[in-house]
Amino acid sequence: METKYGDVIKFEKQDYCGAIILDNVEKMNVVGDAFLKELGALQQDILGMEDLRALAIVANGDNFSAGIDLKFLHEVSSEKVKASLTHLQGLYSFWQTLSIPVVIGVQGFCFGSAVELMLGCDIRIAAENLRLSLPEVKLGLSPDMGGTTRLTKLVGTGQAKRLIMACEEIGAQEALQIGLVEKIVSVEKLRESTIRLAQKMATYPPSSVAFAKKGINLAEESSVAAGLLFEQAQSTYCCGTEDIKEAISAFFEKRKPSFKGR
């Protein structure tokens, strides 16, 4: 089914998988007031969707997003940023704290704030025509929606400094080479590939997917000992669920499993 969520963002849901679609093509899907407000409202609705097991993020048009709306940036002040930035950072951190997997597909221009949106997702798929850049330094500021933090963790200090401090633009192949994206597909197959991967993970037992995501996130930010302790806890829980019994029974009975999330 397809429903128009708002003026610049669409939301579609099929079975257990949802798709967020940037839909402000005339303005190259810029990040401004309307986008941020709609994104926040949609995220609140997502939290109430108990049957949602995976998300895909894609964009209509030739370009994923030109980044921050310069009109929006022109009107900001230190006072406004101080009052709102914690909330705004939370919009992009939302994808990591969400228990379900989030796959994003990016094409054409993906600049600035749009890169930071991408960095918060679990798996990034690039179209062959991707042109990626973080130009904030040229505009008199530094990335403030997770760019310096998440990019550094993802690609390392040197590459992060090159992309952020030198504002270098890179393509899909280089993004893959440095670990900024996980996969490259043709422009024509981008949306299908992104949604299909999310749909694939939505067919797995919700608890095991959620624990896998949490465990990987924890491993990035903590010690080996803490990670192993988490693995013990999640394994103890998962081995007592109905879903693990259903998965094993379905395997032996050569049938499609039906997972209940418990």
Image (cartoon, rainbow, N blue to C red):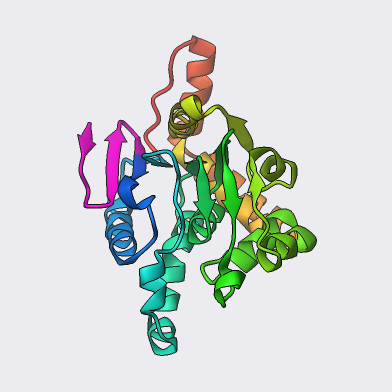
Give left or right: position of 67 versus 215. Answer: left
Q: Residue at x 22, y 35 (%)?
A: 2
Quarter holding the C terminus is top left
Query: Up-down: is 184 above or below 41?
Result: above
Q: Please say whether residue 8 is one of the residues in the magenta stretch.
A: yes
Q: Residue at x 53, y 55 (%)?
A: 111
Which residue is at the front of the view, 227 or 164? 164
Which residue is at the front of the view, 153 or 205? 153
Residue 236 appears in the picture as rendered: no
Q: Residue at x 49, y 11 (%)?
A: 253
Q: Residue at x 32, y 59 (%)?
A: 35
Name which quarter of the figure residue 39 lies in.
bottom left
Residue 230: % across, % down? 64, 55
Query: Up-down: is 116 above or below 142?
Result: above
Name which quarter of the figure residue 77 lies in.
bottom left
Which residue is at the front of the view, 248 or 7? 7
Residue, far bottom: 79
- For the record, the magenta segment spans 1-18
Q: Please say whether residue 249 is one of the residues in the magenta stretch.
A: no
Residue 225: % across, % down? 76, 60
Give left or right: position of 173 versus 96. Answer: right
Residue, far top: 254
Residue 130: % across, % down? 57, 41
Residue 141: % across, % down? 56, 76
Query: Up-down: is 146 above or below 203?
Result: below
